[in-house]
Image (cartoon, rainbow, N blue to C red):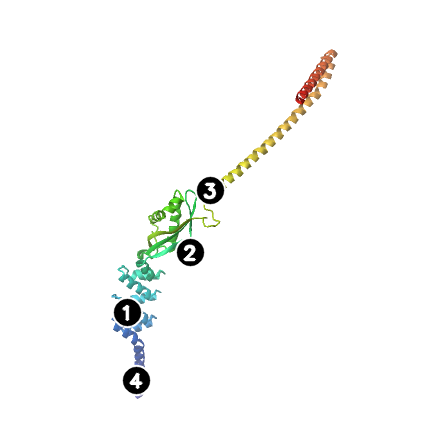
């Protein structure tokens, strides 16, 4: 019986030591919460430890909320931590939004944080808009390249002032979309300008036209302003870049037309030469036919003699006529040569 009592006393002593150890391990955290007005029971702290939730982190987050005039149960903070969220970042965002009179609920802030966005930075951007360079120098491009209707090439740099839109932060497009849309709008607006002088004289007209297109639709930002920071004509700073793209295109088009016309002329020349050769071949063919026909004349005369259709006197008269004709042709050639010699 004494042994049982001794064992029971030892167990009670060990339990008391464990409770004392637990009490002192959470004592500082519990006292901080108690003195700050963010009261948390020791049982809750122990339960946090068992759920592998850092009690000190939860207490610090709740103290910040209470001191900022807000209150929230540790269950919500624990749930967000167990979901993989950044509790302190969410708490700071809630406090900043409350001080700036921006409506932001814990559920909305937690959703933004779990979506991978920096909710605290988003609140600060909503209060203090930030400036985005267009194009982004980090992408290796410092100026936008646009061409006006008169063919002059312009280099443009813009700065876009944006404010975070908390309602569209989850699922909304990022800064890259804003930069791409603004760049496309500026290039399109310059391309529709009659001359480059209009752009140089009134760059604000370009920014106003781009701003009126609602480029921030379905994005996580609201465009406050678009300002043309720099605009210049390409190729005026001693570089080898072409300034008058229109003139260059016209020159290249004229050169291409010239080569095409030359090719067509060469084709016609080749066809003419081929046609000439064909005509010469046909002349040779006709001459051959004439010679062939002339070769048949003696045969025809002999056949006429044999048939009695041609007499000797008829043959002599025909020979005389041929001789007279040959003499006249010879005299005419002599006259032509003498006239040409004079």
Q: Residues within 10 Å of mark 2 (few under 14, many from 20)?
A: few
**Residue 215, percent from left and from top:** 35, 50
Asked if residue 97 shows in the view, the reply is: yes
Residue 63: which disc? 1
**Residue 187, percent from left and from top:** 40, 47
Look at mark 2 in the image and give the residue it sits on.
137
What is the distance, in whole Å, between disc 1 and disc 2 at their CAs? 42 Å
Is residue 127 or residue 2 the one in the foreground?
Answer: 127
Residue 9: which disc? 4
Residue 148: name its quadrant: top left
Image vertical order of residue 1 relative to residue 215, above or below: below
Answer with mark 1 or mark 4, whichever residue precedes in sequence.
4
Residue 115: which disc? none
**Residue 198, percent from left and from top:** 38, 44
Look at mark 3 in the image and give the residue it sits on.
247
What is the distance, in whole Å, between disc 2 and disc 3 at their CAs? 30 Å
What is the distance, in whole Å, between disc 3 and disc 1 at their CAs? 70 Å
């Amino acid at each position: 019986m004494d042994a049982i009592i001794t064992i029971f006393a030892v167990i009670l002593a060990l339990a008391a030591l464990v409770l004392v150890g637990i009490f002192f391990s959470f004592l500082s955290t519990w006292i901080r919460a108690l003195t700050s007005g963010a009261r948390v029971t020791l049982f809750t702290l122990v339960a946090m430890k068992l759920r592998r939730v850092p009690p000190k982190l939860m207490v610090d987050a709740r103290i910040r909320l209470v001191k900022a005039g807000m209150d929230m149960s540790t269950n919500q903070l624990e749930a967000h931590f167990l979901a993989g969220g950044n509790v302190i970042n969410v708490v700071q965002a809630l406090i900043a939004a409350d001080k700036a009179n921006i409506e932001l609920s814990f559920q909305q802030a937690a959703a933004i944080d779990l979506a991978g966005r920096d909710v605290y930075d988003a609140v600060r951007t909503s209060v203090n808009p930030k400036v985005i360079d267009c194009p982004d120098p980090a992408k290796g491009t410092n100026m936008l390249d646009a061409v006006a209707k008169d063919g002059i090439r312009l280099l443009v740099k813009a700065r876009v002032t944006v404010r975070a839109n908390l309602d569209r932060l989850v699922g909304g497009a990022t800064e890259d979309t804003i930069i791409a849309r603004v760049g496309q709008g500026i290039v399109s607006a310059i391309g529709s300008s009659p001359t480059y002088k209009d752009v140089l004289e009134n760059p604000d007209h370009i920014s106003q036209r781009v701003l009126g297109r609602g480029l921030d639709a379905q994005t996580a930002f609201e465009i406050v302003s678009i300002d043309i920071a720099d605009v210049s004509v390409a190729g005026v700073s001693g570089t080898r870049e072409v300034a008058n793209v229109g003139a260059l295109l016209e020159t290249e088009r004229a050169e291409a037309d010239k080569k095409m016309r030359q090719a067509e002329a060469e084709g016609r020349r080749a066809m003419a030469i081929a046609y000439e050769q064909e005509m010469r071949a046909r002349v040779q063919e006709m001459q051959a036919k004439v010679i062939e026909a002339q070769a048949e004349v003696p045969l025809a005369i002999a056949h006429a003699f044999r048939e009695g259709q041609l007499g000797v006197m008829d043959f002599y008269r025909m020979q005389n006529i041929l001789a007279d004709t040959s003499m006249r042709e010879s005299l005419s050639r002599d006259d032509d040569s003498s006239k040409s010699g004079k």
